[in-house]
Image: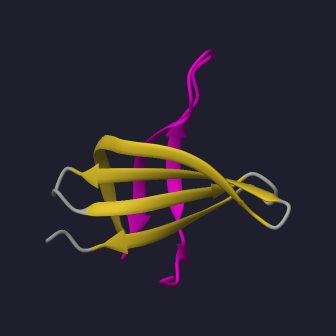
């Protein structure tokens, strides 16, 4: 598994629906999220994780992971073939 990096992210929480990532900062630049392509849950040990596969407005693919235990976000860039 590749190594993720901590990330600063803006998320919208609406009653009755899951969290929606809006943008994140990476490389001192804000990247707006155009769409979420997939969402799933899993765990690492006792920590529940929420995964969001997102595509930016620049058409780059990333995986954003929210750790519910320590309330942290991690980003994993993905190459698109």
The spot of residue 67 in percent (x, y) is 70, 58
Residue name at image x 53 percent, y 61 percent: 8
Toward which corner of the image does residue 25 lie, by quadrant? bottom left
Q: What span is in magenta?
A: 1-27
Does residue 17 lie above or below 69 as drawn?
Answer: above
The spot of residue 50 in percent (x, y) is 61, 50
| Magenta residue check for 5 | yes
Q: Tell me which colouring the rendered structure shows.
A: secondary structure
The spot of residue 7 in percent (x, y) is 53, 67
Q: Quadrant of the C terminus?
A: bottom left
Q: Is residue 1 left or right of residue 79?
A: right
Residue name at image x 48 percent, y 58 percent: 64
Residue name at image x 28 percent, y 61 percent: 61
Instruction: Name the residue nearer the viewer: 51 or 58.
Output: 51
Residue name at image x 16 percent, y 56 percent: 59
Most extreme residue toward the top is 16
| Magenta residue check for 54 | no
Does residue 56 lie above or below 37 as drawn?
Answer: below
Instruction: Name the residue nearer the viewer: 8 or 54.
Output: 54
The spot of residue 1 in percent (x, y) is 51, 82
Most extreme residue toward the right is 46
| Number of marks in the rendered image | 0
């Amino acid at each position: 598994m590749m190594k993720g990096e901590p990330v600063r992210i803006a998320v919208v929480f609406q009653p009755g629906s899951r969290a929606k990532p809006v943008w994140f900062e990476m490389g001192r630049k804000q990247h707006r999220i155009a769409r979420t392509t997939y969402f799933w849950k899993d765990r690492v040990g006792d920590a529940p994780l929420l995964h969001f596969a997102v595509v930016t407005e620049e058409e780059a693919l990333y995986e954003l992971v929210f750790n519910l235990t320590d309330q942290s976000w991690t980003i994993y860039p993905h190459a698109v073939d």
